[in-house]
Amino acid sequence: MNNNKKLNIRSEVENWAKVKFSQINFQDENIDQKHLEEIKICFEKLKITNLLMDGFSTEKLEKTAETGSGLNYSLVFHKLIKKNIISPGLFLAVYASDYLNSNYNKFKLVGFLARGMRAFASLIREQDFASNINNHLIKEDKSVKIKMDPDQDTKSHVDIKIVFNNKTFNLWIYQASKNAIYPHTIERVTGQRGELQNGVHILCPINTEEGQILLKKRISLEKNYEKKRGWKVKLTSTKSSQRSLINKLKDQIKRADEREQILNDDIKYYEKLSFNELEISNGWFFYAKKYISEVSHIILNKKTNIDFQYEDLKNKLLMPETILRKITVFNK
């Protein structure tokens, strides 16, 4: 890896969650000061200025379908990673600074920043994955090399390239959602966006959809707690003569207890589903350590079990397109 070994993303997210976007170091050397006011205006338009820099800050960002010229998010991210300085706010500010210096359409900048924030969530997940898998592999091969810079990504079309014991492994990091698989990942894997390089390829999907449900259930449970606490406080201060209010509060507390039980059961269910796959920290989604260990084990094996030869996999992935492009008859 690069000189980013010292940067622990899991620790960083704990620090970010205590700081607002407005509290980042806007005097950082990577930010062109002549654009400072425009950058702060962009933060206001995104409605993130007074938000804490946690994973929840991405939830209310505008959905944008901005297309056309824009900076490569990965370039900005890795520029900061190499200097061991990264945070959601700094990433957006530096992206905006570089964007404005590149004379792109400034009216599209807010849209690109909204997309950039979602890209940031994926970039830190990749970085954390690479760092943790490096910790596993370096125990056996001190010279292990892990590459994930933008140039490598463009040339080889994979997210993480590992050279371990003189053998090359290509890791594909992506969300196991329909939007991520169709058509983006399929087009990449089948070589429609550029020919794949030789070596063992490992697909590493992560099911963030179940994680999103789990996160919403946890938030609902906390809100339920808050409401119930409020009703209990009000109940203790209500005069015994206010019979109708007392009954109403008791009924609300009872229904809150019932909802709490349902939510706790749901949370246990989704925690069990996602236990082996993902971990959530301050609203950010990461690969579970057990998942990373499993991938590490595949690489550490002297003989890798191959599920598919490339041409066979490619034909299987392209089969739906082959069927739908010709006259086809089927029964239901």
Image (cartoon, grey):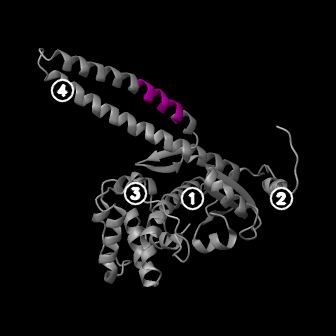
Residue at 61% across, 57% down: 173
Quick check: 316 left or right of 264?
Answer: right
Query: Which of the two discs, 2 and 3, sits closer to the camera?
Result: 2
- Residue 250: image quadrant is top left
| Helix, strand or loop at mark 3 | helix
Nearer-the-camera pick, 147 or 204: 204
Query: Which of the two discs, 4 and 2, sits closer to the camera?
Result: 2
Question: CB of mark 1 within 8 Å of CB of mark 2?
Answer: no
In terms of sequence position, does the residue under pointer 3 or pointer 1 come before the other?
3
In terms of sequence position, does the residue under pointer 3 or pointer 4 come before the other?
3
Say the numbered circle drawn on residue 234: 4
- Residue 261: image quadrant is top left
- Say above or below: 322 vs 65: above
In terms of sequence position, does the residue under pointer 2 or pointer 3 come before the other?
3
Residue at 41% across, 37% down: 218
User: Disc 3 to disc 4, how far (Cα)?
Assistant: 40 Å
Question: CB of mark 4 within 8 Å of CB of mark 2?
Answer: no
In terms of sequence position, does the residue under pointer 4 or pointer 2 come before the other?
4
Q: What residue type is labelled 3?
A: Glu
Say the numbered circle drawn on residue 130: 1
Q: Where is residue 49 in the image (x, y as percent from the top left)?
A: 30, 62
User: Disc 4 to disc 2, how far (Cα)?
Assistant: 66 Å
